[in-house]
Amino acid sequence: MSASRPSTLKHRVVVVEDSKAVRHSLELLLRTRGYVVSAFEDAEHLFDADHSPQADCFLIDFRLPAQDGLQVLTALRAAGSAAPAIMITSCLTADLRAKALAAGFRSIIEKPPQRLCLIDEVANAIAEGPALA
């Protein structure tokens, strides 16, 4: 299945992004590609949801209020989620890349993300499956 075509399977993507405009844009892009999307503005809202959202892939911003994306992924892993995670950031450095990969992010995408690059990364992450423990 080509990543540029809408998904026929209803894979679930959880987006954690504090910018309302970026969050909405990511939601819209992913939904038009056939994904079921749950979006949260920060870690507090993600973890305070009535039930922890199930995900086939997480898309997490690095700069978030209270907890950064590295801390969010650490908390998700501690809660038992093995779903692949992709970091998005506007402040990518070699140090951040190394820390993100060491924390378990499968890839890092710079903002503003190119639509097809982002869709391909999400599709590849889901195809490869859960992160190894």
Image (cartoon, helix red, strand yellow):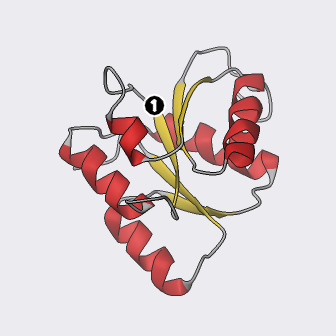
Look at label 1 and name its amino acid.
Asp
Q: Relative to 73, does residue 91 appear above or below in the rendering?
A: below
Q: Relative to 58, does residue 102 appear above or below in the rendering?
A: below
- Residue 131 lies, in percent from the top left, at 34, 46
Residue 83 visible, this angle: no
Image quarter of the N terminus: top right
- Residue 104 lies, in percent from the top left, at 35, 59
- Residue 58 lies, in percent from the top left, at 48, 42
Q: Mark 1 packing: few (<14 Cα in 10 Å), some, or many (20+)?
A: many
At x 32%, y 27%, the residue is 52
Could you tell whether 75 is left or right of 58 in the image? left
The count of marks equals 1
Could you tell whether 86 is left or right of 90 in the image? left
At x 35%, y 53%, the residue is 73
Front residue of 128/79: it is: 79
Q: Relative to 97, does residue 20 appear above or below in the rendering?
A: above
At x 57%, y 48%, the residue is 17
Residue 108 visible, this angle: yes
Helix, strand or loop at label 1? It is: loop
What is the residue that sits farthest to the bottom in this orientation? 94
Q: Relative to 65, does residue 59 appear above or below in the rendering?
A: above
Could you tell whether 91 is left or right of 41 in the image? right
At x 33%, y 64%, the residue is 103
Q: Quadrant of residue 47?
A: top left
Mark 1 — residue?
Answer: 56
